[in-house]
Image (cartoon, helix red, strand yellow):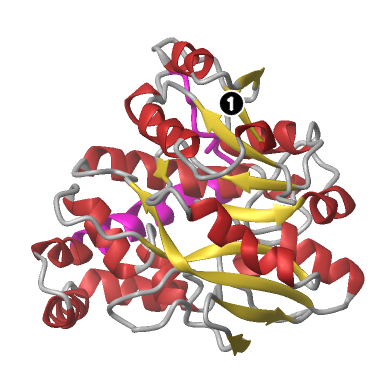
Amino acid sequence: MLPTITFIIPTLNSALVLKSCLNSIKKQDYPKDKIKIFIIDGGSTDSTLKLAHKFSCKIIPNPQKTAEAAKAIGVKQLQTDYVALVDSDNILPTRHWLKKMLLPLMSDSQLIGSEPIKFTYRTNSGYIERYSALLGANDPYAFFTGLYDRYSTLSQKWTGINLETKDFPTHIKITFNPNSPLPTIGANGTIFRTDFIKNNFNSNYFSDIDIISSSLNQSQEPLYFAKVKIGIIHSYCESSFTKFIRKQKRRISDVLTYQSIRKFNWSTTAYSKTNLTFGLYSLSLIFPLIDSVKGYLRHPDPAWFFHPLACLSTFLIYSSVYLKNKLGLNVNYQRTSWKQ
């Protein structure tokens, strides 16, 4: 018998991408009565809610507007066996995606969750989407530190962290150990057992990368996770550099703003010693360009040459927001005009 699952999708003026996301869920080769979709909405003024009604989603208000607050609201209402953390700009690439993602979990009770091993590369998509899919990360800083969690054509690995793994035909079984670095697992199609979430979460802020680490810190016991050998589409910023800038500002602002209420300090995992090195790498321009050429030789696509600009802009944004935070200035990213 197939298990029940809830898709949690945070939204805020997400109409431009949400329809494709919901369509891909509805087209799954899976019993419709075993799927629930929670739209946790931060006050959309576009047609987001109209789309949610059309697809028979449960709409739950999110006064705090942030995706992390939305996920916290959603997981507290879970009544299904599993939960899928999906963003509004994600698309499940095949009709069998859900079954393939659940298969390792149904056959191995040790596994707490599963995640696609790669971002699906689409030839005709925007250059920033293609760049992210090829790099294996939406954030070049995560790639530079080795914390990325999707297969990279550049490194030819799915993460830069040395982990204990066991290879199976459909997935890779990973062992996460206490007090060890972790990749940025937890978003863009990650599935968790509901029991694991319920037993390890009690907050108004659900950060994707924190749930595993907080559990490890509390239990001091290993956790087991599956990287499934399929992809997920993340349209991310398409070809909009403006959107890339906006999302990078939001990312670092949220990390700093909500650091005080999180159980786990992301910066310690992110090898904070590499911050200066990343700055030198980015400012040089030549080293990112060399990596662009390496990536292009492995998978020819001009999107690789966004890499120097992605690194430089990320370093400048992260540095400026971090300095403002150190000076005691408000870095909370306002979402009054946010849209996907």
Q: Dot 1: what SS?
A: strand
Q: Nearer the viewer, residue 10 or 277?
A: 10
Which quarter of the image is occupied by the C terminus? top left
Q: Name the foreground residue: 144 vs 45.
A: 45
The residue range painted magenta reads 309-336
Q: Main secondary structure of the magenta part?
A: helix
What residue do we see at 37% from left, 57% from top?
138
Query: Which percent across, then down, holds residue 323?
Result: 48, 52
148 or 189, nearer to the observer? 189
How busy is the neighbourhood of tag 1: few (under 14 within 10 Å), some, or many (20 plus)? many
Please, what is the three-letter code of the amino acid marked with disc 1?
Answer: Ile
Q: Quadrant of residue 298?
A: bottom left
Q: Is residue 340 visible?
A: no
Residue 333 among magenta residues: yes
Residue 227 in the image: above or below residue 17: below
Mark 1 lies on residue:
39
